[in-house]
Image (cartoon, rainbow, N blue to C red):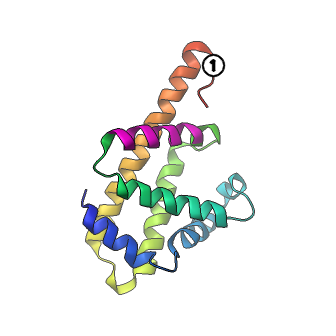
Amino acid sequence: MDKELLTESLVLVDGQEEALTPRFYEILFARYPAVRPMFSADIGPQAKMLRGAVIAVLDHLDDAAWLTDTLGALGARHAGWGVTAPMYDAVAECMIAAMEELGGGAWTPAMTAEWIAALGAVASLMQAGASAADEVDGADGVSAR
């Protein structure tokens, strides 16, 4: 993945205004209203957490162990909250839509392609963590979540 392009494009769409994650949630809830009940009424704290997670992933792109461990654990927690595999596609779709909208004319197809790859990798690691937790749950009856 092109860390420089990912970082530059994130600054383009988020910058000082920190607009990306609030807009992402607006798009997500408009396109997929069935997921709205999974979140608290005040989406502000969740938007800040998501923003922090995106930045942390970019900061650790060269650290495969951190990405695997951190995103795997996050995926296990999300599975415990009822997140399903198709929801990862919805999240990526809505995140890209928010980025393209906020980036305007400065947003490029290369940025879209890079974020599709990055979000796909994040989803894969999270889903692997959820699957591993399910295997542990099934093996000994003890919940890993």
* Residue at figure coordinates x 26%, y 69% from the top left: 110
Label 1 residue SS: loop
* Residue at figure coordinates x 58%, y 39% from the top left: 77
Q: Depth check: give the residue in front, 88 or 145.
A: 145
Which quadrant of the figure has residue 27? bottom right
Quick check: can you spot residue 105?
yes
**Magenta stretch, residue numbers:** 65-77
* Residue at figure coordinates x 54%, y 26% from the top left: 134
* Residue at figure coordinates x 39%, y 84% from the top left: 104
* Residue hosting label 1: 142
- Magenta span: chief secondary structure: helix
Q: Quadrant of the C terminus?
A: top right
Judge whether 17 appears above or below 131 on screen: below
Q: Position of residue 47 (x, y in %)?
A: 59, 64
Quick check: can you spot residue 32?
no
Q: Is residue 29 left or right of residue 64?
A: right
